[in-house]
Structure formats: C-alpha cells, structure tokens
Amino acid sequence: VRRARAEAVPSGNHRDLGESLRSIRGGEADAVVVLGLDGERVLMLQGADEPYRVVVETMSEGALVVDARDRVVYANPSMRALVGPKGDSVVGTRFDRLFAADSAWLRSQVRGWMSHPGQTDARLGGEAGDGAFVTLSGAPLRTGSFKGTLVIVADITRRRLAERRMESSLAALTAANAELGRMDEAKTNFLATVSHEFRTALFGIQGYSEMLGRRKCPPAAVMQYAGNINDDVRRLGRLISDLLDLARMESGHEQLRTEEVDLSELIAEAAGRAGAGTDRHDFAVSVAAGLPPVPADRDQVARVLANLLANAVKYSPAGGEIAISAGEHPEGVLVEVRDQGMGISPDLIDSVFEPYRRSEAPGTRAIQGTGLGLPIVRHIVELHGGRAWAMSEEGAGSAFRFTLPLRVPAPDTNGVTHKRGQPDAAVRRSDQIER
Amino acid sequence: LSDKTILIVDDDKQVRELIAIYLHEEGFRTMLANDGAEAITAVSKQLPDLVLADVNMPEMNGLELAQRLRSDPQTASIPILMLSALAQSKDVLAGYSNGADEYATKPIELAVLLAKANSLLSRQPGSSP
C-alpha cells in the first residue's frame, strides 16, 4: 500500500462499494477494505489499470494531470524531480506557476488540450528562472466525472543547449567567413593596385626607351628621357621593396640593427629628399634643442620618415606646407608630420595603418601607391616599442605621429627577434621615463 | 592624317608627355588634359578628332569622361581610345560599356598605340581619304 489510506465499506452496501472502487481507479485510494460477516477483505487495484500506473510512475518524462480549473491533481516522480525542491508540493497548485512562460497563454494552451491533443515548448520556472527547457504534449483526460488534461513534460534542455551552441558556432563561423571574404577582396584589390603600379611604370620605361632609340631623337631630349626612365625605375624599386617589407611583416620576424640615432639629422635628410621630388610643397623642420639620441635602426627610421613624407606629399596634391617636428614625450621622443592636404575621414583614420586597406575615399584611387607605406610605418615603429597614429580633419590636413622609446625594447626569446606589439614593455618604459 | 588633333588625357605627367611627344613626331596635333574635368573644358574650346584617355584619374575618371562625351551630340561621334594600366577583364568591359571604341592596356609599344589611333581615325565617317 503506497498511501496509508484505505476506505472501510460495510459489505452489502453496494452503492458505496461501487464509489470506493472508482476512487481506487481514480488514484484517490490504494485499497478498499470490505467488512463482511467472514471478516475483512482488502481489495486493491491490480486489474487492468495497474500496468499503466506503473508506466506513468516510472517513465523518465514528467506527467501532470491538470483539472478544468488549472490545478495540478497529479504529478509523477519525474515531474516532481523536474520541478526541483518544491516538487513534492505541486499537487493542488496552479500548473502554470511551474513555468517561466506567459501564464495566460500557457493556461489557454492546456485548456485547449482538454478537448484535443496538442504540443508546445516551454520552460520550467526553476529557482531563478533557470528551469529546464521542456516540450509539453497534452491530451484530454476523462475518467468518470473528472474532466481535465494529461500533460507529458519532456526535458529537452540538453538538446536545446546543444542547439544554442551550434547556433553560436554557426554565427562565429559565418562571421569568420565574412572576414575571410573581406580579406580576400582586400588582397584582390591590392593585387590589382600593385599590377596597375607596375604597368604604369613599365609603360614609362618602355615608351621613353623607345623614344631614345628613335633616329630622330634630339640630343637635348636624351637627358630628359633618361631621367624619366630613371624615375620609373625608382618607382618600381620602391614598389618591390614595399612588397618585400610586406612579406617580412607577414612572416612576423624581423631584426633591428639598433644604434644611437640622431633624429634631427635623419629628419633633415628625409625632408631634403622629399623636397627634391616636389615643387609644390614647403618643408618646415623643427626639432627641439637637446633632443637625446634614440636607440633605433637608422635605415628603418629613415624609411618611416620617407613613407610619412611621401604620404603627406601624395595626399596634399594642391601643395602647401609640410611641417615635421620632433620633441620629448612621456613615451620617449615624439615625431610629427603635418600636411595641409585632403585629410582622412574619421571612420577611416584607424584603417589607414592596416595593410591592403588604402583609403577608398573619392579622389584617392587616382593617387599612386599601393597602400603599404603606412602599414610599414606602424610595423617599424612598433618593432622599436613605440606607437604610430594619425589625427585629421577632413579637408584640413592630417598629422601623423609616432613615438620612439629612449630604451631598447626588451628582447624576446633570442634577443634580436621581436614580434609585433609589446604593450607590457611599452608601459614599463614609460614608467621609467617619467621617474 | 597630319591635320588630325588628338586629345591626350592622363594624370601622370610623364605618360602624358611621352604620348604627346611621340604623336607629335608622328605628325599629329595634340591637346593635353590632366583629368576628365580638364578634358571636358578642352573639348568645349576645340573638338579633337580622337580622345586618348586614361581611366584612373582625379576629378573625373576616364569612364565618366567617355559617358559625358557620348551623351553630348556635339562630341558623341568622337572616337575614344582608352589606355589604362587596369588590365582585368572587368576593367576592359567597363571601358567598352561606358563608351570606349578601343581599350588598350599599359604597357604598350608606341607603334601599336599609333596603329590603334590611326585605325580609329580612318573609320571616322567624316574623315578625308
């Protein structure tokens, strides 16, 4: 006897006996004790209903019987376990209190199942809204005068979590794929740009050398044609060294030949060279008196300056002043190259240092270059432990700045090879400088 | 053919001058423009017999220039020879679909460029034999 409850019925009272037997079938009583002349007889439900009761009591899904007023009249052990600590007190409560979903909606669903079967997904309330994800399958239940709904509650939490993991992996994959697509497109554009630069320079070389070879080439023109060929050959040379730099950058390993470098001397040289290539720009150099020498790779820093100045010239096609200044800074030495050109729009200002991402702003497609100059600048500066960034007002010019620390960056594993970005080392150095 | 005028449009000064010197030596008159906008101004002053235009240029590129020339009845029949370092199929197709009669890619042998220019000029409806 599972419940210490039995009904005693005097034998011969057949009407009461019939009702008591129904109460066994309905689950209200487990046994009926019949008091007869020959003593007590215990009647228990062992007939047709018992196997179904065992199924319901032992199955892994939860089972609820809900009456017409939304009250739980029965919950099997699996259902009580699903509900958790309050599982043993669910009988008598309103069933929708067990769920996290909108109560009114859930009640109307379950009432509908009183007349025809149905299914829905829901979530148990749990202790803190963290209950199991479940599928509810309902069907009408009628026994005697009882009219209600049988609800089978299947725990689908594991399936749901797996689905969520799959969804988020899928989202991550989709994002990664889109990024790859963008990179692929950027590289395709880059190749087209490089090809354009090569073809343009080659046409100059081919055309002017053809002109030199013509019988009627006037002697006075020879110098000019040769000079033009030389310009294009240099252009090709820069292109090739940019490409080699890019390949080195992408390999992630590079060596610095560090020595004490006098920046004022390097800046003067760079300004002189850049000035020789343009007659529309004035170069104003101002270096703070007593600027200490920096430990740096002279050729690489010269390359940084050359790239920044070439950039300033290129992006101020109307000419104007290009101001180069250098002074002390909490992070070591700060160098700035400022132009009066077209400037950079705010949404592009960070991407100008990324390889293959040359500004797509109107007017810039026609400007020569592969877009490798600034990425190379940032790479070299970071290799030295410094920072490179840009400031700009669109239409009012740009300022490119970089810092170089006064101490050699802390060497990596083998002492000469440095990888990109050493934020810890940079912070340490700036602390030392401020002391 | 020596009375023909060719408008050379290219933002690269050395390229522009190379073509100009060569065509001049071959007996043509030449006009020069740095980009599409300058070319439109030049054409409004004097109609050339042929436009030889680059594609990548500031202000107005070669494709837009071709469109503008085609849409104006005054200039619609002037042959356009595009000469660009953009050499992918899509660039060539863009050239023709915007109104080029011929699309040549840099680098090109000057004699070949001349042959293309002569071919376009001789097919002109109003050209003298």
Image (cartoon, coloured by chain):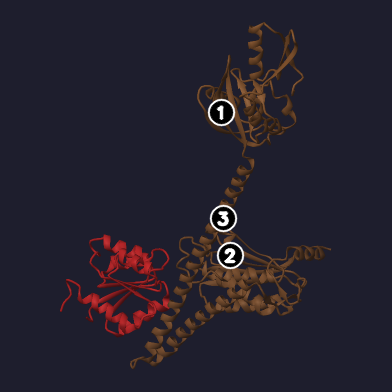
Chain colours: A brown, B red
In this view, the residue in front, A43 or A226, is A43
**Could you tell me if the residues under marks 3 and 1 are in contact, i.e. CB atoms within 8 Å?**
no
Query: Of the residues tagged 1 and 2, which is closer to the observer?
Result: 1
Instruction: Report in which chain the residue with disc 3 lies.
Output: A
Q: Are marks 1 and 2 on the same chain?
A: yes
Q: Earlier in the sequence, mark 2 or mark 3?
A: 3
- Identify which amino acid the numbered label 3 is placed on: Leu
In this view, the residue in front, A163 or A37, is A37
Q: Which mark is residue A173?
A: 3
Q: In the figure, residue B18 lies in which quadrant?
A: bottom left
Instruction: Report in which chain the residue with disc 2 lies.
Output: A
Looking at the image, the residue that sits furthest to the left is B129
Q: Which mark is residue A138?
A: 1
Question: Is residue A329 something one can see in this rendering?
Answer: no
- Identify which amino acid the numbered label 2 is placed on: Glu
Query: Of the residues tagged 3 and 1, which is closer to the observer?
Result: 1
Describe residue A271's horizontal placement relative to residue A88 as left or right: left
